[in-house]
Image (cartoon, rainbow, N blue to C red):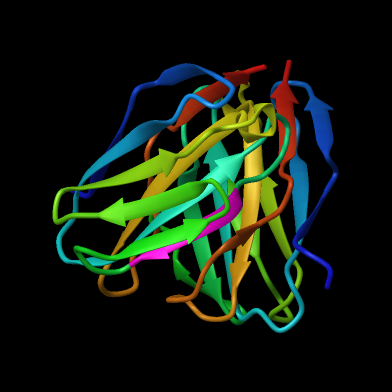
Amino acid sequence: EDQVTQSPEALRLQEGESSSLNCSYTVSGLRGLFWYRQDPGKGPEFLFTLYSAGEEKEKERLKATLTKKESFLHITAPKPEDSATYLCAVQARGNTPLVFGKGTRLSVIA
Amino acid sequence: GAGVSQTPSNKVTEKGKYVELRCDPISGHTALYWYRQSLGQGPEFLIYFQGTGAADDSGLPNDRFFAVRPEGSVSTLKIQRTERGDSAVYLCASSRGHTDTQYFGPGTRLTVL
């Protein structure tokens, strides 16, 4: 069974304090690993897709990396507007649905 | 362009009632998905449509849940004899094809009293 575990459950940072969120996964043949951002009361907003170990993608203060067992979302010099829940999901090869983790709730304090 | 839209944004109903939740996908997206998200959890897959047909309904929890997409665009999730445990946010997503990025709507918050 495909599984995704995200840690920590919650993270509180001072503005400018860089950190990383972890997504550990087990999947029977990875097609893609996805990162989404979710603000309270809203639907998930797509950030990145990673397809193979060693791949990295960046967007503003965010960088996502992928190994064969886990993915990291690195946040550099975060700002209060980066506060949100960050969701990780995996999709196996074939017509399989996305499997999500429970998310990491990030709070960035000014 | 317009994103995925869902109506209503909030729905309050009584135990045992029937509800319909609507999803309008991004124009041109052939794949449409329904998820359910409980508080503090990630979205949980319910059903996936490719065009008009349900390609995978393995996530529907029981036969009280049913979804349709008669013209390959708008979809309706139908829940019969609602139970308090059905209370959650119901999310809809669409993608160009099944292997493409899924874009989510804002969700419908369902509360069963």
Residue A11 sits above or below residue A42 on the image: above
Which residue occupies the foreground of this view, A49 or B107?
A: A49
- Give whichever of A25, B50 is nearer the camera: A25
Q: Is residue A21 left or right of residue B1?
A: left
Using the rendered image of the protein, determine whether residue B89 is visible from the camera's viewpoint: yes
Quarter of the view holding residue B99? bottom left
Residue A34 pos. (x, y %): 41, 56
Identified at 40% across, 45% down, the residue is: A88
Asked whether residue B107 is drawn in magenta, I would say no
- In x, y percent, where is residue B9? 83, 40
In the rendered image of this protein, does residue B41 appear above or below residue B22? above
Q: Quadrant of residue B19?
A: top right
Let me know if residue A48 is in the magenta part: yes
Residue A76: x and y in percent read 47, 38
Residue sitting at x 63%, y 26%: B87
* Screen quadrant of the C terminus of chain A: top right
Question: Camera-side residue: A103 or B54?
Answer: A103
Left or right of residue A54: residue A20: right
Main secondary structure type of the part rendered in magenta: strand
Q: Residue at x 67, y 26 (%)?
A: A80
Q: How many marks?
A: 0
**Percent coordinates x, y for residue A91 in the rendering:** 33, 61
Range shown magenta: A45-50
Left or right: residue A51 compared with residue B76: left
Residue B47 vertical placement versus A9 (above, below): below
Residue B64 in view here? no
The correct choice, above or below, for A55 with respect to A44 in the image is below
